[in-house]
Amino acid sequence: MGIAPQDRIESLCRNDMDAIERDVAAIKAAMKKVDEMMPRTWTGKDADHWRTAYEARMKQLKHLFETFPTEEKQLVEQARRKQEKLDQKMHGGHV
């Protein structure tokens, strides 16, 4: 017997979100390594400009990562509601 449709959508969403969380963790680890290397890189005006631009991009990326959990919950709930409607339609309104 297969997985029920609603359980399947939740499982698929969880698998997708777990993959995203692993990727975010890998990106954060890479960002940390770059931050650790910064003091040992080149210096001067060009380096200062690059560092300023880098820090601005990293700030935006960190903000995106901070908003991810809330967005994740909303997307999963939206998919769950959509699947529930499809299940009801498929079973004549009885689930």
Image: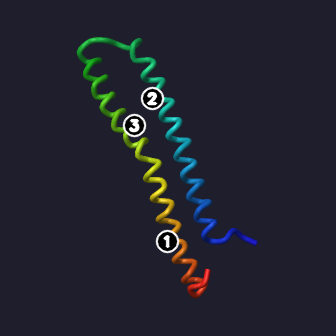
Taking depth in this image into account, of 14 and 27 the one nearest to the observer is: 14
Mark 2 falls on what kind of element?
Answer: helix
> How far apart in space, not on screen, are marks 3 and 1 (Cα)?
30 Å
Q: Is residue 37 above or below residue 5?
A: above
Q: Residue at x 47, y 65 (%)?
A: 78
Question: Quarter holding the N terminus?
Answer: bottom right
Select label 3 or label 2 by which is in front.
Answer: 3
Classify residue 73 as left or right of residue 62.
right
Q: Which residue is mark 1?
A: 82
Quick one: label 3 or label 1, which is nearer the N terminus? 3
Classify residue 53 as left or right of residue 39.
left
> How far apart in space, not on screen, are marks 3 and 2 (Cα)?
10 Å
Q: Residue at x 53, y 67 (%)?
A: 80
The amino acid pointed to by label 3 is Lys
Q: Which residue is mark 3?
A: 62
In the rendered structure, are the residues bearing label 3 and label 1 in contact, judged by CB atoms less than 8 Å apart?
no
Quick one: label 1 or label 2, which is nearer the N terminus? 2
Quick one: label 3 or label 2, which is nearer the N terminus? 2
Q: Residue at x 49, y 40 (%)?
A: 24
Mark 2 residue crowding within 10 angstroms, few (<14) / some (14–19) / many (20+): some
Taking depth in this image into account, of 82 and 2 the one nearest to the observer is: 82
Mark 1 falls on what kind of element?
Answer: helix
Q: Which residue is mark 2?
A: 31
